[in-house]
Image (cartoon, rainbow, N blue to C red):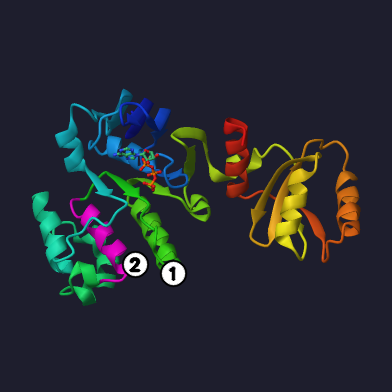
Amino acid sequence: MNPVVLDHITKTYENGKVLAASDVSFEVASGELFGLIGPDGAGKTSLFRILTTLLLPDKGNASVLGLDCNKDFEEIRRRIGYMPGRFSLYQDLTVKENLDFFATLFGSTLEENYSLIKDIYEQIKPFNNRRAGKLSGGMKQKLALCCALIHKPEVLFLDEPTTGVDVVSRKEFWDMLKTLKQQGITIVVSTPYMDEAMLCERIALIQTGKILTIDTPGKIIAAFPVPLYAVKAKDTYRLLTELRKRSEIASCFAFGDYVHITLKDNSNESQTDQLKQELIQAGHEQFEIKRIEPTIEDSFIQLMSQTYGR
Ligand SMILES: Nc1ncnc2c1ncn2[C@@H]1O[C@H](COP(=O)(O)OP(=O)(O)OP(=O)(O)O)[C@@H](O)[C@H]1O
């Protein structure tokens, strides 16, 4: 049996008025680095809380390491590591005191599983006597990861570990996850950052409590169903407004300096030449249109409009 199983999980809040998870099913294989990718409010934290035995679903079953998340919560809690999205450390305790505290909770010591956290801990060791509340975002994140690993968990749940952390620390963090994976730990990580999706082996794209798709990032991108074009002009806002009004455009989203579009009819390649001519005639300066490969963000938007019609 896979170490993480969600089977038709539905979770609502406020007497059913707020839907956080809608019939969610997926499994994570042993030793896999699995990502739950979606924007704020998509339902990621609710799923993590169900898997870490802190929340009961309305419907469905969840199991971790073959144990039932409802009945076997004590054993699950002993065998998993959980880094919640919000900062989970004791701000008034020092780095060392936090580590000792979490080790004691699990009847362990810092020394006992030192090899597992060594590489991460050495980076924060110089700040051993600093209170956690006085650490930088990246340092707090490393300390929180050490605390989640201190009892040598078999499955690690990381809820938005890189939110609010600088780009360098984000990269370092993902390098650390790769190392942990090599040591056989199963990792489930959530993130709202689409670029981080590419660093997972498999991902579930989630929006408004619903799984849009589950696969490897490469396969999700490869399944993008139609040609995608990047369009640019000097006045991006005006370009976007005009493209949105045109009947031949199926989808149209701003991506940095570019606007990504798909067409309703993909049988006639000269349509893009026509579009170019008409928009240049309409006074768009520095106009450019080119066929591009989709990113995971393009796939997310496309799947979202397919599922929700927006
Ligand atoms: N305790 C609660 N009471 C009422 N609604 C809640 C509660 N917790 C979450 N929600 C709502 O459930 C939905 C899913 O929230 P959840 O926190 O699981 O998503 P998320 O993807 O983790 O987003 P975020 O990063 O913003 O926490 C959201 O609409 C949220 O407002």
Observer-nearest of 176 and 261: 261
Looking at the image, which residue is at 91% across and 57% down? 281
Asked if the residue under mark 1 is in contact with the one under mark 2, i.e. CB atoms within 8 Å, the reply is: yes
Observer-nearest of 240 and 194: 240
Ligand 1's image quarter is top left
Q: Position of residue 235 (x, y in %)?
A: 75, 63
Q: Amino acid at mark 1?
A: Val
Q: Position of residue 158 (x, y in %)?
A: 33, 49
Looking at the image, which residue is at 21% across and 50% down? 152
Looking at the image, which residue is at 39% across and 58% down? 162
| Residue 141 falls within the magenta-colored stretch | yes
- Image side of residue 92 versus residue 292, left or right: left
Local SS, label 2: helix
Evaluate whether residue 2 shows in this view: no
Q: Position of residue 251 (x, y in %)?
A: 70, 42
Residue under pointer 1: 168
Residue under pointer 2: 138
Over which residues does the magenta segment extend? Answer: 135-151
Evaluate whether residue 105 shows in this view: yes
Q: Earlier in the sequence, mark 2 or mark 1?
A: 2
Q: Residues within 10 Å of mark 2 (few under 14, many from 20)?
A: many
| Residue 112 falls within the magenta-colored stretch | no
Local SS, label 1: helix
The disc at residue 144 is: none
Observer-nearest of 149 and 282: 282
Q: Residues within 10 Å of mark 1 (few under 14, many from 20)?
A: few
